[in-house]
Image (spheres, rainbow, N blue to C red):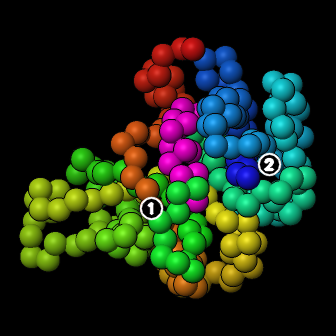
Amino acid sequence: MILGIIPARYSSTRFPGKPLALIHNKPMIQRVYEQAIKCESLQQVIVATDDERIESVVKDFGGKVMMTSSQHQSGTARCAEVIQNIDGDFDVVINIQGDEPFIVPGQIELLCACFKNDLSPPGQACQIASLRKRISRSDELFDSNVVKVVTSESGEALYFSRSAIPHHLGVSENYWLSLGVYYKHIGIYGYRKDVLEKLVLLPVNDLEKSESLEQLRWLANGYRIQIAITDDETISIDTPEDLHRAEKFFPEK
């Protein structure tokens, strides 16, 4: 069975209380939850939080919620606590970003399919899955806030970076998009339960520190990340300004 978890914490340097911010008069966390439960491959969806205000709001709109430790440094660690304490025989966990209120249910389905229709070689079942989307604009390609990913021929991640990868040696950056295909990483993850429990025990390494990307810790320790391709755009809400732009871009519903 597959469990969808939405990590949500109240504290945020750039946007405190973000999960409770209203988008067309509905809390952001509710919009994420309502999109997630549309994914038919998820047997259950639950919000994981460390804040009673978020817990209360989720209960008010009829969602499932679990209180978790305030000491977690990542959504991955919060997901690991949930899977250790929840009832149910879940084999796979999907970590759904709590700041993407317009996530497309089909993107979650893509991750679930990596585990349900596993095409990995015998003895190498899919351990971790994530998404990528083709980059079509130079401003995205050279934006350090947009994480890039390169993969093997079989679609497994080789490396993630905030820099544009691959690098076209001796060629002006103005031409890079016309010379190759670039992908940005969409930060939604799926993990096998046993793998998730091991990931949170790994110590932080130098690669993760240099790029501030936890998935590099996993790669450095030999874990495989299958990367499915999506054509759908996602909108992350990191600041109040992002929220205002999202409200204008998406019609009220």
In screen coordinates, is 64 left or right of 45?
A: right
**Residue 155 at what x, y percent from top left?**
39, 66
Residue 179's image quarter? bottom left
Residue matched to label 1? 227
Outermost residue, top direction?
Answer: 252
In the image, residue 246 sits, relative to residue 205, either above or below, namely above
| Magenta stretch encompasses residue 68 | no
Q: Residue at x 55, y 44 (%)?
A: 109
Q: From the image, give the main secondary structure of the stretch colored magenta.
A: helix
Q: Residue at x 89, y 49 (%)?
A: 67
Q: Residue at x 90, y 40 (%)?
A: 52
- Magenta span: 101-115
Residue matched to label 2? 48
Residue 124's image quarter? bottom right
In what element is the residue under mark 2? strand
**Marks 1 and 2, the one that precedes in the sequence:** 2
**Residue 15 at what x, y percent from top left?**
64, 42
Instruction: Judge by depth and name the residue closer to the eye, 251 or 157.
Output: 157
Q: Which three-letter amino acid code belongs to the residue tagged 2?
A: Ala
Q: Which three-letter amino acid code belongs to the residue tagged 1?
A: Ile
Instruction: Judge by depth and name the residue closer to the eye, 37 or 54.
Output: 37
Please indicate, yes or no, whether residue 78 appears anywhere in the rendered image.
no
Q: Residues within 10 Å of mark 2 (few under 14, many from 20)?
A: many
